[in-house]
């Protein structure tokens, strides 16, 4: 099996572990919640976005949900150092992109 295929298989199994479920009560019943989180680090190079799902959102399991380049959603524990590193990386990338792109107002002038 090729190295890329092995990583994809591992990621697929990880997605099965970290299912999202509807919130049970709380302020926003339409919000998705994680049933569990993975303790296994997610490779940062496959992550394109993140969002928080907290107890204050009506979720029983606090989590950071990472969206992968292929659109999978993976639930991670917010207190883990590797989760913080991925979030900081995504914020740096976002900040650089906003500096590079011209503002809409400057394009009109």
Image: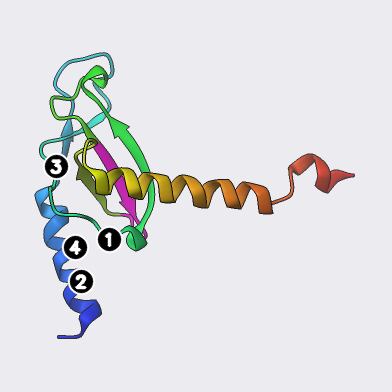
Marks 4 and 3 sit apart, C-alpha to C-alpha, by 14 Å
Q: Is residue 27 magenta?
A: no
Residues shaded magenta: 64-71
Q: Do the residues under discs 4 and 3 have CB atoms within 8 angstroms? A: no
Residue found at the far top of this picture: 27
Q: In the current view of this chain or complex, which residue is farthest to the right?
A: 109
In percent of width and height, residue 104 lies at 75, 43
Q: Is residue 77 above or below residue 57?
A: below
Observer able to see residue 19: yes
Q: Which residue is mark 4?
A: 11
- Crowding near pointer 4: few (<14 within 10 Å), some, many (20+)? some
Mark 2 vs mark 3, CA separation in Å: 19 Å
Mark 1 surroundings within 10 Å by alpha-carbon count, few (fewer than 14), some (14 through 19), many (20 or more):
few
In the image, residue 67 lies in the stretch drawn in magenta: yes
Residue at (51%, 52%) from the top-left corner? 93
Q: Earlier in the sequence, mark 3 or mark 1?
A: 3
Q: Which residue is mark 3?
A: 37
Badge 4 marks a residue whose secondary structure is helix
Q: Are the residues tagged 2 and 1 within 8 Å (C-beta)?
A: yes
Residue matched to label 2: 7
Q: Alpha carbon of mark 4 to alpha carbon of mark 2: how far?
A: 6 Å
């Amino acid at each position: 099996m090729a190295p890329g295929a092995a990583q994809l298989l591992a990621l697929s199994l990880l997605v099965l572990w970290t299912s999202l479920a509807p919130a049970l009560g709380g302020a926003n019943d339409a919000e998705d919640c994680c049933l569990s989180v993975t303790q296994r680090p997610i490779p940062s190079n496959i992550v394109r976005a993140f969002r928080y799902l907290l107890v204050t959102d009506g979720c029983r399991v606090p989590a950071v949900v990472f969206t992968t380049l292929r659109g999978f959603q993976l639930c991670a524990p917010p207190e883990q150092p590797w989760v913080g590193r991925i979030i900081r990386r995504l914020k740096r990338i976002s900040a650089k992109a906003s500096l590079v792109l011209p503002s809409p107002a400057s394009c009109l002038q």
